[in-house]
Amino acid sequence: MDESTAPAIQIDELSRSFKGPQGRVKHALDKLSLCVGRGELVGLLGPNGAGKTSTAKILMTVLLPTSGQARILGHDVVREAQAARRVTGVILGGDAGLYARLSAVDNLLLFADLYGIPYREQKPRIRDLLDMVGLLGNERKRVESFSRGMKQRLHIARGLLHDPDVVILDEPSNGIDPVGARELRALIREQVRGGRSVLLTTHYMFEADELCDRVAVMRDGVKIAEGTPESLKKQTDGQVVLTVQVSGAGEGHVARLRALPGVRSVGLAERDGSQILDVHSGQETDVTAAVLAGLGGLPVLQVSKREPTLEDAYVSLISQDRT
Ligand SMILES: Nc1ncnc2c1ncn2[C@@H]1O[C@H](COP(=O)(O)OP(=O)(O)OP(=O)(O)O)[C@@H](O)[C@H]1O
């Protein structure tokens, strides 16, 4: 396929299984099909174990699929792995992939050599990238002295060294503080504005909502929904979310609330030292009294109602699919 006209990423019925304990087969990915168009930013969402990282690893050519196909700018990631790698930038979260005892600039020089970037071009290119990610002034410091956010910005510079058309970001904001994460989102947006195509895996729904043109939701290796963030939110039309700030709630309470008439799904999360229960129901039934009764005397700090967000649509999708 012609590189200039092919989609950025084309995934067709991609599967990957692993042999688990006692020879049991685990389907990490089950016939995933997904397309990322030129200049598009697509998010891959899903709970732990959904298959996001397996997908990203196959696209990065570090994991072989069991069946199916994936192409980057028309290059098959198995048969034409080298060509696929040439056009792909990989940006991972966390500490892996950088040499802690080297400075930022030495890390980039090392990777520039590995990418085969001509010597004359290396220094100006590295300077531009350090400037873009806001690390000029710190480029001679060892990476081990960097904050997580600074390391993440260096990861971005590293991933863009060879000026790739397609970028894969695997959980880029994991462990980054809110300010760092906001800067990171701005950087990602800038890349897309500059013409790059991006596949982003994330756990953070507000990040996906703010950044992505389209999202695909996965669970247990299967794509269960795909659309724009707006279209997924629309699927929750007619729903309302009752938010209860509580303490001492457990899985038993959640199960009891899930069984209440009119309740569609229930999420429980820890936030700022207390628990937040999100109870989704149809607008036609007010479940407030039944929910409070269902909590059986637990201390309730606050009760409010709100419109569904992308995170609510996601929780609703994930739980609907379980039934
Ligand atoms: N090397 C492996 N051997 C066996 N099972 C694996 C291997 N890699 C992944 N899996 C399994 O495949 C499934 C999908 O894993 P994957 O890491 O792709 O999910 P994920 O959506 O990225 O999850 P997370 O958000 O936790 O990173 C999981 O059940 C995982 O345990």
Image: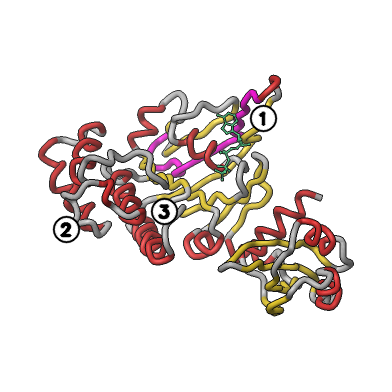
Query: Marks 3 and 2: which is nearer the front?
Result: 2
Tell me which numbered mark, 3 or 2, is placed earlier along the sequence.
Answer: 3
* Numbered circles on residues, count: 3
Query: Marks 1 and 3: which is nearer the front?
Result: 1
Q: Calculate the distance from the C-alpha at mark 3 to the C-alpha at mark 2.
A: 31 Å
The residue carrying mark 2 is 137
Q: Does the magenta segment cover residue 19?
A: yes
Q: Which residues are magenta?
A: 1-20
Q: Secondary structure at mark 2?
A: loop
In the picture provided, is 36 more to the left or to the right than 312?
left
- Which residue occupies the foreground of this view, 103 or 156? 103
The residue carrying mark 1 is 26
Q: Does the magenta segment cover residue 208?
A: no
**Tag 2: residue type?**
Gly
The residue carrying mark 3 is 39
Q: Calculate the distance from the C-alpha at mark 2 to the C-alpha at mark 1.
A: 48 Å
Q: Secondary structure at mark 1?
A: strand
Q: Position of residue 315 (x, y in %)?
A: 68, 59
Looking at the image, residue 137 lies above or below residue 111: below
